[in-house]
Amino acid sequence: MLERDEYGYVLKIVSNFPYHPWWKLTSQLVEGFRDKKKPGLVSSVGVYSPKFGLGSFENPKMIGRGEVDAGIINPPVTAKMAMEGKGPYRERVGELRAIARFPEPDYIFWLVAEELGIHSFEELAKRKPPLILVSGRSGPTGPDTLTWTVEQVLKQYGFSYQHIESWGGKVLFPGPSVVGVPLVRSGEA
């Protein structure tokens, strides 16, 4: 429940860690809440980081438990899965409501080195090359939504992280794309 003090409303927003792009977006939102014409509307805004850096996974839980008033969730289907207790969510988090949408293309790129000569997941599963897969994050409460999605795609093609490791490969969980993409660019993955 949104708190109020003698100066106005106290708004709590869960975003992500300060180096994450969501943090910058949240700071811009906070400035928008500070209406200069209505100084008593929002007196204070607290921006919170989710547990274990699992923003897309933990943020709906924090909102559902009432620990915060609002938060950023991406991709949008995450909110639906959280409310229904499906996908990576073991239980329902309660009712959530979208109040805004920021246009953001959500892409997961599946890239392999050209010299592998692999053109599909079917070929990947058949040839079993020792590759390095860069995924998202996994914490004590479960995977982030990117990692969960990667797990589901691999499962559809009959293999898993453990299979990749058994082929002589490695699976990395470096965190957000701002950490994972440089690993791919530098050739470490």
Image: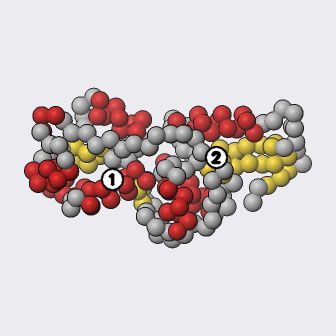
Whether residue 44 appears in this view of the structure is yes
Residue at (12, 47) in percent of width and height: 129
User: How many badges with numbers are in the image?
Assistant: 2
Left or right: 88 as drawn, with respect to 112: right
- Mark 1 lies on residue: 150
Residue, disc 2: 100
Cβ atoms under marks 1 and 2 closer than 8 Å: no
Tag 2 secondary structure: loop
Q: Is residue 129 above or below residue 63?
A: above
Q: Residue at x 46, y 67 (%)?
A: 86
Q: Which class describes the residues within 10 Å of circle 1: few (<14), some (14-19), or many (20+)? A: some
Q: Is residue 172 left or right of residue 159?
A: right
Model colouring: secondary structure
163 left or right, relative to 182: left
Q: Residue furthest left?
A: 127
Residue at figure coordinates x 50%, y 56% from the top left: 78
* Disc 2 residue type (three-letter): Ala
Residue nearest the observer in this picture, 21 or 78: 78
